[in-house]
Image (tube, rainbow, N blue to C red):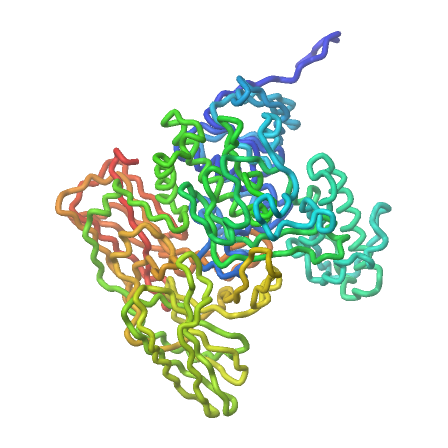
Amino acid sequence: MIKESFEKSIRENKLLSLKTELVVVGGGLAGVCTAVVAAREGVKVILVQDRPVLGGNASSEVRLWALGATSSMGNNNRWAREGGLINEILLDNLKRNKDGNPLLVDTVLLEKVYEEKNITLLLNTAVYEVQKSDDKTIKSLKAFCSQNATTYQLEAPFFCDSSGDGIVAFQAGASFRMGAEAPEEFDEGFAPNIEDYGNLLGHSLYFYTKDLGKPVQYIAPSFAIDNAAELPRIRNYRLNEHGCNLWWVEYGGRLDTIHQSEEIKFELWKVVYGIWDYVKNSGKFPESENLTLEWVGTIPGKRESRRFEGDYMLVQKDIVEQKDYYDRVAFGGWAMDLHPADGIYSEHNSCTQWHTKGVYSIPYRCYYSKDIDNLFLAGRIISASHVAFGSSRVMLTCSHGGQAVGKAVALCLKNGWLPRTLAEEDKIGILQLALNREGQSIPRLNLEDTSDLIQSATISSTSELKIGEVKSCGEWKKLKFNMAQILPLAANNTYIFKVKLQASEVTSITVILKRSSKETHFTPDIDLESKTFQLKKGIQEITFASDKNIDENFYAYVCFMQNEAVDIMLSDDRFIGVMTVLQKETPAVSNYGKQEPPENIGIDAFDFWTPEKMPGGKNIAMTIEPPVQNFNSQNILNNNVRPTADGYSNVWQAELNDQYPELKISWVEKQKISMLRLFFDCDFDNALPSVFVTHPNAEIPSTVKKYKIYDDQKNLIYEKSENYQAINTVVFDEPINTNDLTIILVKKDENIPVGLYKISAYSQNDL
């Protein structure tokens, strides 16, 4: 029993003082990735989240799908899904949650944090006070948990603000911006007219519906709007739309999106319940009779508030021109996506999106405060202009940057550096290499890893894929859109492509060989040659013989131009680094087949060539002379773990009929190996949205599931039988002494060859 007498003084809450090495404030995807990456490096982390679940906008409280550079597979960013830890999370979510249940996303994230013994997780805990040891240094934070009535004093040498609104950076006095810059400040033609379009992006609130199989009455609450029929956006509503499809239910860009957030939320509640009143009771949606509201968000998804200034600020030209700075550590590829401030009440389109030709890189200098010496930034508050923020704000881009922060903290602790010190040109390569070792895939950065023992090895394999024939599966596809087969072709060759077509009438077909103008993107904006073939009615074969002898490797687009009187033969064969795309529309991401921006806004016009989602996206059946040979075992030695726009697949693939291909790694002298890391294909072109979308497979079909590794004495040193992850890290209890390694991999899918991007091996001294 506890019994206390009356006290004249005010009682204090329980106070718990905690010291650690890194405090991460904000448990959205960026904060989770920051914390987990740092913890895996041995950093002691406290992760503070003011909500009962992790994930932020990706959690079950908001239910926004996590997307990034792939832009819902609606742009030209091939093989662009973010790598590293966030990819691991997406693949875990796919494995157990391919139907997109938002509640299960919470468990995937909680498990990731729970499994890291170096992380202390404080849920339902809000930071409310920053304490500084001097003008430029944070000493500690104060936070309060409403569920256990405990006040926390959190002290650490480093802090990361991933809170979304930047509570730590704000209280610490860091320079910040809120709202849109004038076009002339950074020469940004896309900067909005503030008076007309508005200064900030608003919040969105989602709802879900459910069919009960019987009529359901709905009586709106008194606060619901009664003029939903007059909303400019209501014309967009379709009865089957719910969840993320309702992103346009947005409001608040004319208000203070921090201090008036509760007012914005209540206005969105009024709108949501008013929309549902209109749907149920206007008589215009009779098919809604059996529908009920299953869920309405209780906190809105917030897009924009403060952005804090680092030693560099990302701007429009960096994104459009894909500028690569010396300190790049992450990448983005979502469109520059701005919304009218009036949201659902605006007469403007719900959003204005302008895509770029390829992915852009983000400098490390955007991820720490220029004013506060021990403060990192992650998530949507990083150093970016309003226009650049329109792209960098999406969750997978934020997560990718968070990974860089987590690794940077570990290096700063190890070396006694401040965040700015690590940005120096003679030091940043250490961070970049550490990130790429774990699949970060920093664009167009090829650093030599001198500690990787594989780099001094000889590589051989039982077979190597040569694509001379893509076998017919008997399925025809009508050329309703321009369709292209993407292939990595070798320099100093002329190629012949033979394709089977079926014409419903006498007609013609044009075939164009295209490529990208730069090695920084996969946009096919250069026509190399074009030929037109006359077709008779019925089935026939055409031969496209290229006259161009190209002096460099490149990704070619063999394009069959639209003709609905023509069908083209497809194949069930699928190969890593080879795919088909269509010049089709994806209105959800403002792709209408061609991007045609206004003049003088500094954005390129170009065509979109985008893939179909699985199980669509089959290759075109064809024969190719000479065969495509971009898949040899020497690719294991390079540092890219996805196809790159310079014309390389970067993957070893075995022959399609090789059921148990072997890869052999040999050294002249014995090596003492403490760790191996294997990089498998995981279809980086697939967006893998975390919720709302149902995926056809719980595992990526091209990912190797089973393999065994033997030493030079034929001893089995490791085996895996249920792999679905892109990266497998094998740490041995005792080092393996061997002259060679033999890896035997098991073919999983009849129509997909075994593939492997890279193997790395390290001694104990280099871990």
Q: Which residue: 50% across, 49% down? A: 318
Image coordinates for residue 629, horizontal then vertical, percent: 28, 67
Q: Is residue 692 above or below residue 493?
A: above
Q: What quarter of the picture does the C terminus occupy?
A: top left
Query: In this image, 90 relative to 213: left or right?
Result: left
State the residue in front, 372 or 734: 372
Image coordinates for residue 424, horizontal then vertical, percent: 39, 34
Q: Is residue 211 above or below residue 416?
A: below
Q: Which residue: 26% across, 35% down? A: 764
State the residue in front, 638 or 384: 384
Q: What quarter of the picture does the N terminus occupy?
A: top right
Q: Which residue: 39% across, 24% down? A: 416
Q: Is residue 84 above or below residue 286?
A: above
Is residue 76 in view from this perspective?
yes
Query: In this image, 342 relative to 310: left or right?
Result: right
State the residue in front, 582 or 170: 170
State the residue in front, 335 or 516: 516
Q: Is residue 30 above or below residue 175?
A: below
Image coordinates for residue 67, horizontal then vertical, percent: 54, 52
Image coordinates for residue 637, horizontal then vertical, percent: 27, 52
Query: In this image, 440 relative to 338: left or right?
Result: left
Is residue 657 in view from this perspective?
no
User: Which residue is at the far left?
Assistant: 668
